[in-house]
Image (spheres, rainbow, N blue to C red):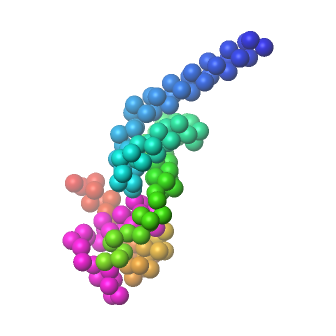
Amino acid sequence: MKQAEKTQTSQEVIRHADHLTLYDRYSSMAYGIILRIIPEPERAQAVLIDLFASPQLKECAEIPAHTAGEIIRLARVKALAAKPTDQISSPILSTSDTNGHFDTNDNLENIVFDLSFFQGYSLETVAEKLQLSRTNVLKSIYAYFKHLRSS
């Protein structure tokens, strides 16, 4: 019986060490994503702690080549879930007129990416609100990443 307890304890220590290693390596990236979605530092920090204490984190580390992408995905999901419902509506959507024109200096690619990634709107909702086809929404996201890589 003591051997089983000892093995279980050592596995918990290893798992805790893995979480700390992931935290050391990816916490600043995850915090930046969470902070963009939840602009309140205290709440963002609570989500960050929840992220690195969650059991889903183990799945992120199983394939080392995909760890950063999986942590980004998990950080986004947890931040969107923790986002207060009164912050769900985007100021970008409220500044559009009936023709889909905007009173902001952001380009379309930035607006589409912000709505789909940081605000959590589905592609169909973004297309409807901006009066674009779903294909054009996807092209805008592609153009955003292409611009991001070249800069």
The percent position of residue 110, horizontal first and vertical second, equals: 30, 65
- The residue at 38%/69% (across/down) is 90
Q: Quadrant of residue 87?
A: bottom left
Relative to 81, does residue 133 appear above or below in the rendering?
below
The percent position of residue 120, horizontal first and vertical second, equals: 46, 63
Relative to 84, does residue 21 appear above or below in the rendering?
above
The percent position of residue 106, horizontal first and vertical second, equals: 24, 69
- The residue at 39%/54% (across/down) is 38
- The residue at 35%/54% (across/down) is 39
The residue segment tinted magenta is 96-121
* Residue extending farthest bottom: 98
Relative to 18, does residue 38 appear above or below in the rendering?
below
Left or right for 46, reference 107: right
Quadrant location of the N terminus? top right
Task: Inspect this view and state whether residue 66 appears.
Answer: no
Q: Nearer the viewer, residue 52 or 18?
A: 52
